[in-house]
């Protein structure tokens, strides 16, 4: 009789193991729900940044390929207004671009790092590109406009600035698409630039 554990001890151990199994399942589900919520928040922030960025990319590609025949860039309190005509000459094109947000990324970076290392790496790189875009590209365009050069010289300075930042612009575009694709929790196609 000394070789067996008492029935009450065996039942207590069995109940403890059952409870731990349920707790493990609950923690796993909570982690999954947390990751899903974080992906949704990040996807929506990157998507909101991507809508005006898509217009900027179209403009940028036409500017680099010398397809723009008329360009007017103005600053306002909220950002930069660009209107232009290209060699297609169909009609005027214009868009407004302002600094891109990274508030959600900053706020939830530590939470993301606890649940998804791959996403953490992507959003850290994306955050660096957002900062570069806001400070150096948009800031540089605003600086060119603030110097009261003749319009043609300003346009050339803007073009030179964008050409010098080509790698960053392309990397930013790839990262936006990569993060939106990774964070898309719906079965539909993610928004892409």
Image: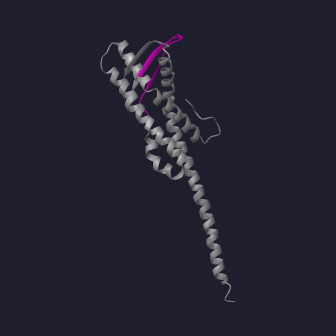
Does residue 5 sit above or below 164 in this rendering?
A: below
Q: How is the image coloured?
A: one colour
Question: x and y percent of residue 147 in the render?
Answer: 30, 20
Quadrant where the image shows the C terminus: top right
Q: Would residue 21 be counted in the magenta stretch?
A: no
Residue at point 33%, 24% (across, down)? 143
In this view, 40 is above or below 53: below
69 sits left or right of 24 in the view = left
- Any part of residue 164 in sight: yes
Image location of residue 134, percent across then percent down: 40, 32
Question: Which of the 4 image quarters holds residue 81?
Answer: top left
Q: Residue placed at 65% from the left, 74% from the top?
A: 14
Task: Identify which residue is drawn at 57% across, 51% down.
Answer: 33
Residue 84 part of the magenta segment: yes
Question: Which residue corresponds to the image point at 52% horizontal and 38% vertical from the top-left?
Answer: 44
Question: Could one spot residue 78 in this view of the protein?
Answer: no
Per the rendered image, the range of residues in magenta is 81-100
**Percent position of residue 133, x then y:** 42, 31
């Amino acid at each position: 009789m000394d070789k067996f554990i008492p029935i009450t001890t065996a039942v207590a151990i069995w109940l403890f193991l059952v409870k731990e199994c349920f707790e493990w399942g609950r923690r796993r589900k909570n982690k999954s729900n947390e990751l899903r919520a974080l992906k949704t928040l990040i996807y929506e922030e990157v998507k909101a940044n991507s809508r005006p960025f898509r217009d900027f990319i179209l403009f940028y590609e036409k500017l680099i390929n010398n397809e723009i025949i008329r360009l007017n860039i103005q600053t306002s309190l909220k950002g930069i207004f660009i209107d232009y005509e290209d060699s297609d000459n169909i009609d005027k094109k214009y868009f407004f671009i302002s600094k891109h947000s990274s508030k959600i990324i900053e706020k939830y970076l530590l939470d993301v790092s606890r649940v998804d290392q791959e996403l953490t790496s992507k959003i850290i790189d994306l955050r660096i590109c957002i900062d570069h875009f806001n400070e150096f590209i948009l800031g540089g365009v605003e600086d060119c406009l603030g110097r009261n050069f003749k319009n043609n010289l300003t346009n050339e300075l803007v073009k030179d600035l964008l050409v010098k930042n080509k790698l960053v612009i392309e990397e930013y575009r790839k990262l936006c698409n990569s993060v939106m694709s990774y964070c898309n929790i719906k079965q539909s196609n993610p928004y892409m630039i």
